[in-house]
Amino acid sequence: MSETNTFSIRVEPTKHSRLSQVDFNNLKFGQAMSDHMLVANYENGAWTDVSIVPYGDLTVSPSMSALHYGQAIFEGIKGYKFEDGTVSIFRPDKNWERFNKSARRLQMPDVPEEIFIGGLKTLLDIDRNWVPSTEGTSLYIRPFMFGTEAALGVHPSASYKFVIITCPVGAYYSKPISLKVETYYTRAAEGGVGFSKNAGNYALSLYPTQLANEEGYDQIMWTDAAEHKYIEEAGTANLIFRIGDTIITPHGDTILHGVTRRTIIELAEKWGYKAEQRKVSVQELIEGIKSGAVSEAFAAGTAATVTHISKIGFEGQNYELPPIEGRDFSNKVLDYLNQLRYGKIEDPFGWNFIV
Ligand code: COI
């Protein structure tokens, strides 16, 4: 806990629910926002006005610091519904911890647990009818914070807004994805902000991703800034490989320390696989695909969940990964996490946070 205050949450329910307008059989990622949102303000060194209000526009100043100097961070979390109607959030404590790490790197205030986790619980309780229940669907939860001070001097904003919005979603990627190894543009350098979930890390990915899309790839595989030799992440998700009998994920402070990535490594260890968090060179990956040592490759993230990688493009050549059906580890992870998140099996880890 970063503060000892107790916060009361003011709740203003909507008079006009939009729930009946949503086609729950055809959910597009991030388009139909739920009825309510949480908003809290940071002023004079303290959090105040924690409120749950109808989802709607926010009023900001054109000289607001986040628009100019980028003090803006966010998280991605998912809520699930069990068959008996119980609503559960997957490991929100880990996202809260990461959110505050991002905040500190960008010289922003911590958000206390009572507001982040407590507010999320109250918000999902009010919007529990928005949590879809069919397999593959969930309520995507987007907490974010930005500097609101109206001033153009380059300094930490004196005021901030913390907001949580939510939306029912289906799959972010509806099929396996192809990745192009990026050997010119850079996502993050040592000592930079690669580990933090800040808006700028996504803005900088848009142009190189567009170039990769024009070449027919779905996404970029980022490599290290110094040599473009080591694999980092996919930008919208972390990367995990099975090389020989080992489950391997790239590691370091230039990549986002994903909650899904961490969950999968924990599962691998629990199931008796050898798991490593270490540098993986592009050469190791390509040689491994050619020799058959790389049997699985997937993207792992809150939005992406487990998305199989079909093909990797490197220096003008394409390298096909083995068929999806034979990918024992990633298929087992996906199946296990689905069962656990929808409350179909016991939760031995305490990962489901019940609302
Ligand atoms: C998430 O997985 O929650 C993310 O924030 C990735 C985003 C690009 C959708």
Image (tube, rainbow, N blue to C red):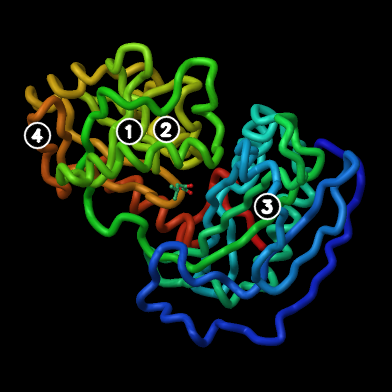
Q: Nearer the viewer, residue 114 or 10?
A: 10
State the CA–CA distance, disc 2 to disc 1.
9 Å
Q: Quadrant of the N terminus?
A: top right
Neighbourhood count class around disc 4 (C-alpha, 10 Å): few under 14, some 14–19, many 20 upward: some
Q: Up-down: is 250 above or below 146? A: above
Task: Kindly state the secondary structure of the residue where label 4 is placed.
Answer: strand
Task: Kindly state the secondary structure of the residue where label 2 is placed.
Answer: helix
Query: Which is closer to the viewer, label 3 or label 4?
Result: 3
Q: Nearer the viewer, residue 297 or 282?
A: 282
Q: Up-down: is 249 above or below 100? A: above
State the CA–CA distance, disc 3 to disc 1.
41 Å
The residue located at (28%, 44%) in the rendering is: 210
Which residue is label 3 attached to? 62
Q: Quadrant of the C terminus?
A: bottom right
Check residue 318 in the rendering and tell me which mark sits there, or answer none. Answer: 4
Circles 2 and 1, Cβ within 8 Å, touching? The answer is yes
